[in-house]
Image (cartoon, helix red, strand yellow):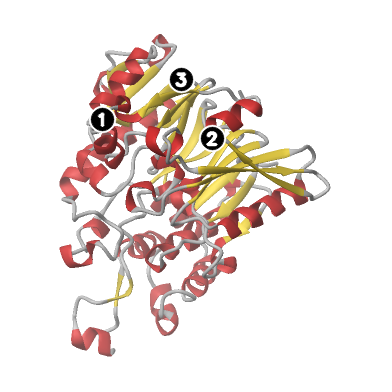
């Protein structure tokens, strides 16, 4: 029986995977930041301090799983450890080191995969630079959302656009194939296997709005070909009609994924970045109607919100930055539209997005610092609508928000 289930963006959260940023963050130099898809280098101590509040709060409302712990569980058995290293050697030249790496304990190896494996001493890479890696550190790993998405009880393993992130997909794919806590009904897309220059897909673009209604970004990270492939895979298993709204986003750094401009926050509300979703230069939106017989019908919608309304999901937009021409752009850069719902009408987001929080307050959301809940001064059950604000200015500089840092595994049905 499947223990993985996501039928909405807002259902009561039961379990979630996270990753506490570690030494892999400090392995990155300013010169390497752009290569690693960062806006800047970030100090580890500050990032961990901010992340602790997110991690601790999630522990109050759901079962949390740490990525390193899950990988350790999966490679505890010797045959699984060798299988993982063999798969991992497809993207890292560790083939001749596998026997050596097999001598490491499961915990030590799991950590090394995240923090990086140094090049062997008898190699040109080591000779030219004693700090070179044969398997690079993974500073983006704490953005757990991108490497995998769950649709119903099935898994979409990411086909990352950039090589620097593909290792993350190998890790999460292995976990969802081998960890007993995450039984599922199989892969809709096998990113490491299916990725090519035209087929790329990442979890930040995939939004499950209802059991058979999805919004997917066509972004610099997710291609139209990948959306088509996902639609066909859904059609192969669908027992009832399904609908995908494909949002053709601007191909720029501030809109790398759909969740940088849109996140559903309640049954009838969503955070939105106004210029991309409502302005005169708003993104084109294409509707894919999928029949259980495998047919796909294409049409164009006036906007995402208008299309969703016709599909029975009537969302009131709450504008990032309050819709102010300057504040909305500043707060979008700090992931102001990127929130994470842990229950209907109850979300987590950065406290630095002051105008967005004010807009939420005008819509009936109580804005409460995470610390109030961590100190036992407040209870989430006391609020019908709630925005839990946690400090994250250094985390935001990494290029993502609360949704980016969380991979929900199971939610209750609405």
Q: Is residue 273 visible?
A: no
Kindly indicate the quadrant of the structure image that contains residue 192: bottom right
Q: Is residue 45 visible?
A: yes
Residue 322 in the image, given as x and y percentages of width and height:
31, 24
Q: CA distance from mark 2 to mark 3?
A: 23 Å
Residue farthest to the front, as pictured = 280
- Sequence-first tag of 2 and 3: 2
Q: Which residue is mark 3?
A: 345
The residue lying at 19 percent from left, 82 percent from top is: 129
Residue farthest to the top, as pictured = 382
Residue farthest to the right, as pictured = 293
Mark 1, Cα crowd under 10 Å, few <14 / some 14-19 / many 20+, is many
Q: Which residue is mark 2?
A: 303
Q: Which residue is mark 1?
A: 353
Left or right of 293 in this view: 134: left
Q: CA distance from mark 1 to mark 2?
A: 25 Å
């Amino acid at each position: 029986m499947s223990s993985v289930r996501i039928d909405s963006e807002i259902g009561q959260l039961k379990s979630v995977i996270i990753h506490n940023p570690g030494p892999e963050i400090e392995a990155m130099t300013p010169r390497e930041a752009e290569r690693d898809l960062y806006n800047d280098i970030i100090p580890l101590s500050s990032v961990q301090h901010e992340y602790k509040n997110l991690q601790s709060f999630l522990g109050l409302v759901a079962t949390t799983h740490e990525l390193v712990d899950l990988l350790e569980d999966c490679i505890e058995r010797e045959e699984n450890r060798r299988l993982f290293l063999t798969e991992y050697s497809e993207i890292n030249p560790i083939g001749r080191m596998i026997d050596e790496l097999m001598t490491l304990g499961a915990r030590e190896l799991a950590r090394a995969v995240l923090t990086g494996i140094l090049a062997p001493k008898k190699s040109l890479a080591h000779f030219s630079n004693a700090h070179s890696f044969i398997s690079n550190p993974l500073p983006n790993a704490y953005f757990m959302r991108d490497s995998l998405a769950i649709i119903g009880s099935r898994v979409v393993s990411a086909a990352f656009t950039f090589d620097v992130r593909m290792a993350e997909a190998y890790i999460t794919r292995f976990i969802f194939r081998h960890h007993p806590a995450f039984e599922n009904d199989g892969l809709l897309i096998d990113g490491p296997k299916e990725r090519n220059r035209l087929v790329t897909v990442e979890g930040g673009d995939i939004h499950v709005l209802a059991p058979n209604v999805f919004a997917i970004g066509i972004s610099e990270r997710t291609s139209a070909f990948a959306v088509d492939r996902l639609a066909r895979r859904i059609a192969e298993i669908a027992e009832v009609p399904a609908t995908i709204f494909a949002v053709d986003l601007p191909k720029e750094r501030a809109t790398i994924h759909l969740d940088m401009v849109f996140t559903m926050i309640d049954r009838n509300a969503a955070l939105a970045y106004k210029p991309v979703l409502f302005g005169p230069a708003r993104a084109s939106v294409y509707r894919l109607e999928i029949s259980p017989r495998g047919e796909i019908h294409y049409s164009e919608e006036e906007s995402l919100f208008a299309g969703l309304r016709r599909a029975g999901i009537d969302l009131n937009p709450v504008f990032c930055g309050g819709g102010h021409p300057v504040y909305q752009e500043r707060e979008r850069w700090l992931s102001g539209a990127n929130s994470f719902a842990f229950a209907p009408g109850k979300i987590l987001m950065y406290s630095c997005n002051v105008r967005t929080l004010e807009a939420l307050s005008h819509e009936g959301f109580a804005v409460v610092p995470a610390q109030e809940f961590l100190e036992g001064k407040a209870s989430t059950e006391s609020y019908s609508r709630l925005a839990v604000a946690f400090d994250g200015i250094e985390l935001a500089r990494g290029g993502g928000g609360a949704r980016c840092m969380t991979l929900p595994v199971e939610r209750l049905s609405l």
